[in-house]
Image (spheres, helix red, strand yellow):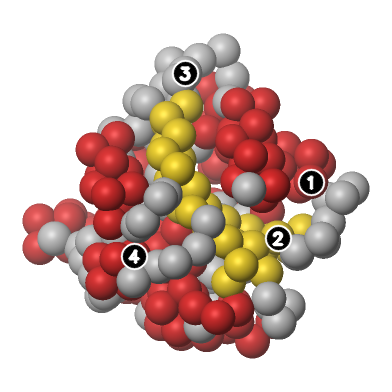
């Protein structure tokens, strides 16, 4: 079977995809590639390609989806199919860039936990029974990755390219998926992406916000299974 490469979101690691790794690793090679070593999306994508199998299925969530689109732009022939989860194809707006500067300053001053707790994590999730457990996991992932990763990823996101042209040229099985309650990357952004890519499948996960892989793993796995078997 075609190997599956997973790309996690900002300040996340393979634990973001633990239900998917458990579900799919028995039937195919599943790799979660880190996106933490560079400060540009282009370099992060090049690193993913350097370590990836010759041809593979690619799924990325949030910042991972942003890097996945750049992987597709750099090497379309190596991607068998792509899934873009709770992400954004557009370049970062000036307003969002300006909001990053005080966050980055606070992290440089040793306040990573406070930035994640007060400014970022509360925006992630829907109000579900697992909200507290998932928020704790997100904090653990962020603190394990550390301030240097936060700063590098922030710079990469600030300078990321618009991928509208990449998506409009895509000719491969594509899943566009997001949580219904995602306030960071709303449903309307995913509807836009689905319109850009010919024959893309759009899946909206009820009862989930920005992290449906953890909030609604069964529903997310069902959608990914359909995409992988298409």
Cα separation, mark 4 vs mark 1, equals 26 Å
Q: Earlier in the sequence, mark 4 or mark 1?
A: 1
Callout 2 crowding tier (Cα within 10 Å): few <14, some 14–19, many ≥20: many
* Mark 2, residue position: 4
Q: Earlier in the sequence, mark 3 or mark 4?
A: 4
Cα separation, mark 4 vs mark 2, equals 20 Å
Q: Earlier in the sequence, mark 3 or mark 1?
A: 1
Q: Is residue 116 visible?
A: no
Q: Secondary structure at mark 1?
A: helix
* Mark 3, residue position: 207
Q: Which is in the foreground here, disc 4 or disc 2?
A: 4
Residue at the extreme top: 129
Image location (x, y in percent) of residue 15: 68, 47
- Is residue 49 depicted above or below 164 in this figure? below
Between 155 and 24, the residue placed more toward the observer is 24
Q: Secondary structure at mark 3?
A: loop
């Amino acid at each position: 079977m075609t190997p599956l490469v997973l790309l996690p979101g900002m300040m996340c690691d393979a634990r973001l995809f633990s239900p998917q790794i458990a579900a799919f690793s028995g039937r195919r090679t599943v790799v979660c590639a880190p996106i933490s070593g560079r400060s540009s999306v282009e370099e992060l994508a090049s690193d993913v390609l350097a370590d990836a199998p010759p041809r593979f299925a690619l799924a990325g969530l949030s910042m991972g989806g942003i890097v996945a689109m750049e992987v597709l732009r750099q090497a379309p022939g190596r991607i068998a199919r792509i899934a873009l989860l709770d992400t954004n194809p557009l370049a970062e707006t000036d307003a969002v860039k300006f909001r990053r500067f005080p966050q980055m300053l606070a992290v440089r001053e040793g306040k990573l936990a406070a930035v994640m707790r007060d400014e970022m994590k509360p925006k992630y999730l829907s109000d579900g029974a697992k909200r507290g457990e998932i928020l704790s996991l997100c904090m653990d992932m962020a603190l394990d990755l550390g301030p240097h990763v936060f700063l590098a990823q922030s710079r990469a996101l600030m300078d990321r390219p618009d991928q509208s042209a990449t998506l409009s040229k895509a000719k491969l099985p594509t899943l566009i998926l997001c949580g219904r309650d995602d306030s960071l990357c709303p449903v309307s952004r995913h509807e836009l992406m689905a319109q850009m890519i010919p024959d893309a499948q759009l899946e909206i996960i009820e009862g989930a916000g920005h992290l449906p892989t953890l909030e609604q793993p069964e529903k997310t796995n069902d959608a990914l299974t359909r995409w992988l078997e298409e």
